[in-house]
């Protein structure tokens, strides 16, 4: 009876949710996974849903299996692209869909299907524009190797520092988006491969859209086809492109940071001829930390006046202490490993440590300043 009701519903309206399964040479897992997903949707999912197999140029029997499933299993369709690229497959399927909400999941079904309803419900209700499964959110349960766990955490930390990302997990293969939102964002998303997810989320955040995160249970597939090194290089290139095309705040901060770092090196080098290393380092850091905080308040974040200055300089002091620890440690390590090293080499080692501290400074300043500016904006409305 349930199957008859669903068939009747399909006649009178388009699917509410279209779940895309992008595949490339997945002849071994495709049929089992699609049948399992379809069975779950028929038994447990309250919205009418379609499953779309998006084959991006497979060279094995994936096409034959996908076409057979589309012909024999109600609620399953198949489309084939002539070029590779997960993002390309998703873009094509999403833009052609007539559903209210489109999403995707990896063919290995690493994410527990019980998270599917919490993923799409805020989109169907209109509460959110984009929804992402997160393996790093509180409440998630993840089983994967230490290597992939470390890579994932480092990558998402890089997104927070470099792009100001507020979402926790950019690359979980479990996402959904309102179709009208996809039609706005997908044409602006340049990458059509693995970085597609990250770029889409960054564009959504920059547009002020609501991104809903769902903690998931994730069981990693040890037979993953993802090549770590090429994917990492592609992702780093994408991050750099978004940094250059994004708001100019990162550029202003980088300018101030470069100027401060150069000033630090010059002051340290001048004082090193007259004072002990620790004293030269301390004075150079104090001078440049005060100047850096003042410059970032004014030029990077557009903050003027004395309001909140104490908090801002407290952030600068914290950054100064981090820089002091890092540069002192770098200098001591160099003198231990290379007694009698020339002063220029000391400057190079400690300047490198200071650059690391600069990234920490930016992350702290961004959080401090953004929080205060949001409060000011809220009080003024």
Image (tube, rainbow, N blue to C red):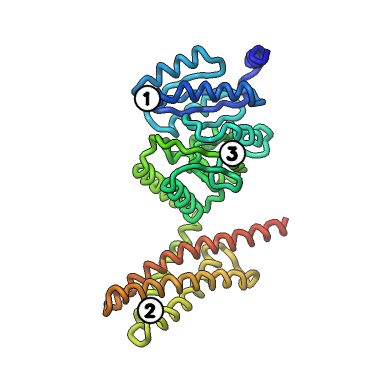
From the viewer's side, name the closer residue of 333 and 163. Answer: 333
The residue singled out by tag 2 in the image is: 268
Front label number (1 vs 3): 1
Answer few, some or many: residues within 10 Å of disc 3's Cα (few below 14, many 20 plus, some between 14 and 19).
many
The residue singled out by tag 1 in the image is: 58
Residue at coordinates 40% horizontally, 34% vertically from top-left?
A: 223
Task: Compute the Cα span from label 1 to label 2.
Answer: 59 Å
Q: Position of residue 342 (x, y in %)?
A: 27, 77
Sequence-first disc among 1 and 3: 1
Sequence-first disc among 1 and 2: 1
Sequence-first disc among 2 and 3: 3
Front label number (1 vs 2): 1
Q: Is residue 175 above or below residue 274?
A: above
Q: Position of residue 301 (x, y in %)?
A: 55, 62
The residue singled out by tag 3 in the image is: 130
From the viewer's side, name the closer residue of 176 and 336. Answer: 336
Answer few, some or many: residues within 10 Å of disc 1's Cα (few below 14, many 20 plus, some between 14 and 19).
some
Q: Position of residue 355 (x, y in %)?
A: 41, 65
Residue at coordinates 55% horizontally, 63% vertically from top-left?
A: 365
From the viewer's side, name the closer residue of 302 and 167. Answer: 167
Residue at the far bottom in the pictured view: 274
Task: Kindly state the secondary structure of the residue where label 1 is placed.
Answer: loop
Task: Compute the Cα span from label 2 to label 3.
Answer: 49 Å
From the viewer's side, name the closer residue of 109 and 365. Answer: 109
Rendered-image quadrant of the C terminus: bottom right
Task: Kindly state the secondary structure of the residue where label 3 is placed.
Answer: strand
Task: Compute the Cα span from label 1 to label 3.
Answer: 29 Å
The numbered mark at residue 381 is none
Asked if the residues shown at circle 2 and circle 3 are in contact, with their CB atoms under 8 angstroms apart, the answer is no
* Image side of residue 236 versus residue 296, left or right: left
Asked if the residues shown at circle 1 and circle 3 are in contact, with their CB atoms under 8 angstroms apart, the answer is no
């Amino acid at each position: 009876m349930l199957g008859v009701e669903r068939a009747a519903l399909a006649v009178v309206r388009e699917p509410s949710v279209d779940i895309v399964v992008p595949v490339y040479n997945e002849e071994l897992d495709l049929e089992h996974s699609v049948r399992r997903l379809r069975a779950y949707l028929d038994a447990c999912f309250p919205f009418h849903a379609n499953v779309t197999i998006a084959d991006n140029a497979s060279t094995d029997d994936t096409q034959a299996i996908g076409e057979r499933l589309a012909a024999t299993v109600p609620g399953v369709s198949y489309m084939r692209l002539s070029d590779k690229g997960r993002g390309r497959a998703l873009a094509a399927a999403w833009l052609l869909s007539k559903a209210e909400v489109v999403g995707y999941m990896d063919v290995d079904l690493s994410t527990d299907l019980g998270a599917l309803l919490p993923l799409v419900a805020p989109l169907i209700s209109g509460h959110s524009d984009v929804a992402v499964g997160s393996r790093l959110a509180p409440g998630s349960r993840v089983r994967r190797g230490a290597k992939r766990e470390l890579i994932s955490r480092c990558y998402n930390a890089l997104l927070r520092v470099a792009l100001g990302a507020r979402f926790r997990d950019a690359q979980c293969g479990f996402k959904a988006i309102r179709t009208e939102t996809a039609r706005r964002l997908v044409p602006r998303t340049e990458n059509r491969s693995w970085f597609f997810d990250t770029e889409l989320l960054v564009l959504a955040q920059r547009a002020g859209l609501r991104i809903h995160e769902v903690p998931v249970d994730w069981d990693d597939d040890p037979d993953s086809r993802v090549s770590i090194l090429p994917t990492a290089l592609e992702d780093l290139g994408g991050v750099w492109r978004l940094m250059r095309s994004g708001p100019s705040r990162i550029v202003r901060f980088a300018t101030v940071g470069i100027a401060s770092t150069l000033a630090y090196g010059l002051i340290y080098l001048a004082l090193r001829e007259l004072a002990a290393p620790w004293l030269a380092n301390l004075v150079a850091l104090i001078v440049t930390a005060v100047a850096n905080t003042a410059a970032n308040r004014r030029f990077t974040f557009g903050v003027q006046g004395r309001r909140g200055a104490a908090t801002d300089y407290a952030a600068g002091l914290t950054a100064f202490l981090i820089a002091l620890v890092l540069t002192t440690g770098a200098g001591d390590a160099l003198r231990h490993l290379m007694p009698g090293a020339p002063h220029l080499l000391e400057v190079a080692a400690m300047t490198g440590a200071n650059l690391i501290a600069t990234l920490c400074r930016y992350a702290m300043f961004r959080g401090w300043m953004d929080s205060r500016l949001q409060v000011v904006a809220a009080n003024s409305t």
